[in-house]
Image (cartoon, coloured by chain):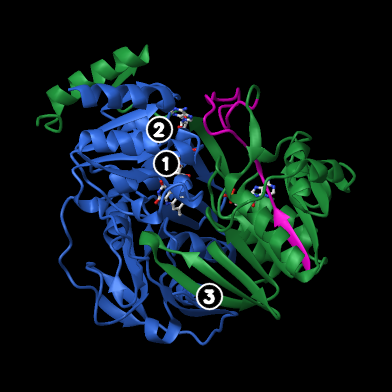
Amino acid sequence: MKILVCIKQVPDMESKFKIDSAGTWYDTSELAWRMNEYDEYGVEQAVQLKELTSGDLTVLCIGPDRVKETMKKALAMGCDRGAHISDADFASKDPFEIAGIIAEYAKDKNFEAIFTGMQSQDRGSAQVGVLVAEMLGLPSVTTVVGFSYDNGTFQVKRELEGGVKAMVSVAAPALFTCQLGLNTPRYPTLPNIMKAKKKELLSIPFQELLKVEAKMETASIQLPEKKGGGLVLEGEVGELADKLIAILKEKTGVLAR
Amino acid sequence: MKALLIAESREGKVLGCSSELIAFSQQTGFDSVMFMVGSADTLPKFNGTLYLADSSKYADYNPAVHKQLILEVVAREQPDMIVFSHSSYGWDLAPRVAYSLGAAQFSEVTEVVNGLPVVPACNSKLRRSLKAKSTITVLTLQAGAFSLSEDVTTAPSVQQIDTDSHSQVTFIGYEQAALGGVDLGKAQIIVSAGRGIGGADNVSIVSNLAKALGGEYGASRPVVDAEWVEHARQVGTTGQTVSPKLYVACGISGAIQHLAGMKKSEFVVAINTDKDAPIGEIADVLVVADVKLFLPELTQRLQAV
Ligand SMILES: Cc1cc2nc3c(=O)[nH]c(=O)nc-3n(C[C@H](O)[C@H](O)[C@H](O)COP(=O)(O)OP(=O)(O)OC[C@H]3O[C@@H](n4cnc5c(N)ncnc54)[C@H](O)[C@@H]3O)c2cc1C
Ligand SMILES: Nc1ncnc2c1ncn2[C@@H]1O[C@H](COP(=O)(O)O)[C@@H](O)[C@H]1O
């Protein structure tokens, strides 16, 4: 089976974010980058499906040169080749343009399964996967937490609120957006990291694939105003513990025995 | 201006989000009509027209067909905006409708400021104001962001809506949540472990503190997904909703889906190495410290009391 998995490189969410000079995105200098958490589940599921069907798996990522580091992780996890869509300014593209680029890349390659994350951690639009499917005229199922494949049909579980799941089946070709906990993403082993270095990782300029226009733009990006918040305690742990106990005694009834 | 509000139902029951959709249209001063795939036996409260498609015919989940039904309503009503909840139903359906209409989609809107929708970015550490390039727009609303000051009590006037389109996706049925042993809903004190505890071996420093305080321990989702703690202890939209007297969040960043499960707690203490972690927004006390060092200290002192 021919399979495609789309991944995005995002900053570590524990970073301290600053606004860029245009005031429309975060400043990208001094950030640590990693694979979007949801996409790790997508890569793992794609690799498992590839192994099951003796298939062929392409990983795609739109972004500047630095995203190749993240793509190498996906290759080390078991993807066969990388399609890097080179775009230094991808953050200014809206989900419609990102999806348009992916759909244009995929359109005559006959992928039978496409995986994306359910959302990206930085932008969190939860749109790109479904839009790609709509553009390609494929059925799609979002928020997948259970996945199996047999004889041309996918059986998946969608996660709903409150721990309920919806069981759904769909014939190939189809697209799936992956939710946290779908599987246990493997750690790339050292031999696989070495092997990944020899795998194809081709860069394609985005201009060759961008055929659609944005539906929206960012007017501005801001740091949230602190809505009061509570007391912030810093210092040595012993003193902090004493302070916290004093506060709990004063403000809550829970320490009264 | 007119909004089409997309209400939700599951297994014949209306889900609570419809009042949030009404709150949104009231705040923005839009006229509104509503759409739902559901049952005529249980209808959402709404002072206006409800386009109802029968879920026994169209299933609870059948996105291509539900999309077609919505497009029928759009053709009749010509709304300027189509409003969903940012829920498993809404984020699945909204991009399909947006694509068919050539509309911009704003995901997880928390408020509208100067006419522009505001959405979170980077785990709510940033907020973005967005501007459409299309005339018609699609929105999904963050759960809990909009609420009514007064409950609507009117029944809607119902219009049946139908389509003969088909879907390639087959909805088979539901798998209910496994019933676990612990009911955190009743606990007065909950100490929860987040990914910041660093590993399964450190769950004990959290459960020890819970024991010293006379409470239960809970967890955030990654801790459950990694199987450090069983699912019954997960707090959040896809776990339990709790409202204890004291909630202690240990190494938890404060993602919206976690907050949704614990923000009704009376007193919240957060322990986090990141002073800017979003949990700080709702915590009464944020202790900036490493949980691995701080929790044992705290537990020891509490045991000595
Ligand atoms: C549809 C959907 C449903 C979801 N449902 C839920 C749900 O029900 N419940 C839920 O919890 N999540 C849910 N999530 C996931 C949610 O979005 C977050 O990913 C999750 O809550 C993050 O968990 P965390 O805070 O433990 O981990 P992280 O976000 O990784 O945060 C870890 C925190 O620990 C801090 N830290 C790191 N090291 C230390 C240390 N040594 N000492 C102290 N602090 C440290 C970091 O600064 C950081 O703030 C859902 C997501 C989606 C999309
Ligand atoms: N720049 C990108 N390159 C490749 N895939 C992407 C990119 N941006 C988003 N995606 C995919 O689309 C999913 C949803 O992203 P979003 O709609 O931005 O929340 C992600 O989890 C990725 O799988």
As drawn, is B25 to the left or to the right of A247? right
Mark 2 touching mark 1, by CB under 8 A?
Answer: yes
Of helix, strand and loop, which one carries label 2? helix
Q: Quadrant of the N terminus of chain B?
A: bottom left
Name the residue nearer the viewer: B213 or B55: B213
Residue at 18% across, 62% down: B152
Q: Residue furthest front?
A: B304
Question: What label does residue B255 carry, if any?
Answer: 1
Q: Which residue is mark 3?
A: A168
Amino acid type of the residue tagged 3 in the rendering = Val
Q: Mark 1 and mark 3: span between their CA atoms?
A: 28 Å
Q: Is mark 3 within 8 Å of ligand 1?
A: no
Q: Residue furthest left?
A: A257
Q: Which chain is green?
A: A
Q: Position of residue A54 (x, y in %)?
A: 81, 68
Q: Say if residue B267 shows up in the picture.
A: no
As drawn, is B140 to the left or to the right of A7? left
Amino acid type of the residue tagged 2 in the rendering = Pro
Question: What label does residue B278 carry, if any?
Answer: 2
Q: Is mark 1 within 8 Å of ligand 1?
A: yes
Q: Which residues are magenta?
A: A1-28
* Same-subunit check for callouts 3 and 2: no
Magenta highlight on residue A160: no
Name the residue nearer the viewer: B13 or B47: B13
- Tell me the crowding category of disc 1: few under 14, some 14 to 19, or many 20 or more residues within 10 angstroms, Cα based: some
